[in-house]
Every structure is written in C-alpha cells, then in structure tokens.
C-alpha cells in the first residue's frame, strides 16, 4: 500500500506528519531520514499488516 506523507508542522526539531491515506495515524519524528521507517512501523501497528506491505512517498 502506498502512503503519501506530508510534513504538517516543523518546529523545535520536531516534524509532525500527516499520512493522507490514513488520517487517523499520527507520526512524529525528529529527522527527515526517520520518516519512512516511522510511518511504515506506525501503519503496520495500526493495521496488523507487515511493514513491507507499505511504500512511503514524502511530499512537500
């Protein structure tokens, strides 16, 4: 499943992310490079599906 991620807010070393296909999913990271792993882990936890079922695309 493809997940489109947008950075909703970036303040004080914190990136609040919005996942368009799963609006109920809230993910926060400190570094840009953490986004794909954090989003796939959160999506897998929410859905019960394996992390490799998800592909993350970061939009700006």
Image (tube, grey):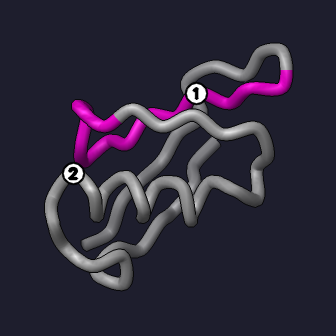
**Which quarter of the image is occupied by the C terminus?**
top right
Local secondary structure at mark 2: helix
Q: Which residue is disc 1 drawn over? A: 16
**Above or below — where is 47 with respect to 5?**
below
Expressed as whole percent of the image width and height from the top left, the position of residue 13 reads 84, 26
**Above or below — where is 31 with respect to 40?**
above
Q: In the visual, does 30 lie left or right of 46?
A: right
Q: Using the image, tell me which numbered label, if any, was put on residue 27.
A: none
Residue at 78% in and 15% down: 11
Expressed as whole percent of the image width and height from the top left, the position of residue 58 reads 57, 55
Q: In the visual, does 7 lie left or right of 49?
A: right
Picture quadrant of residue 1: bottom left
Residue at 79% in and 45% down: 31
Outermost residue toward the right in this view: 12
Q: Earlier in the sequence, mark 1 or mark 2?
A: 1
Q: In the visual, does 36 lie left or right of 18?
A: right
Q: Cα distance, mark 1 to mark 2?
A: 18 Å
Residue at 18% in and 73% down: 49
Q: Using the image, tell me which numbered label, if any, was put on residue 46.
A: 2
Q: Which residues are magenta?
A: 13-25
* Residue 50 included in the magenta stretch of the image: no
* Residue 22 included in the magenta stretch of the image: yes
Between 7 and 42, the one lying in front of the other is 42
Expressed as whole percent of the image width and height from the top left, the position of residue 9 reads 63, 19
């Amino acid at each position: 499943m493809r997940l489109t991620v947008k950075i909703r807010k970036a303040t004080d070393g914190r990136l609040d992310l919005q996942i368009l296909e799963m609006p109920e999913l809230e993910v926060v990271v400190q570094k840009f490079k953490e986004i794909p792993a954090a989003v796939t882990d959160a999506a897998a936890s929410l859905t019960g599906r394996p992390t490799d079922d998800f592909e993350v695309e970061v939009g700006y």
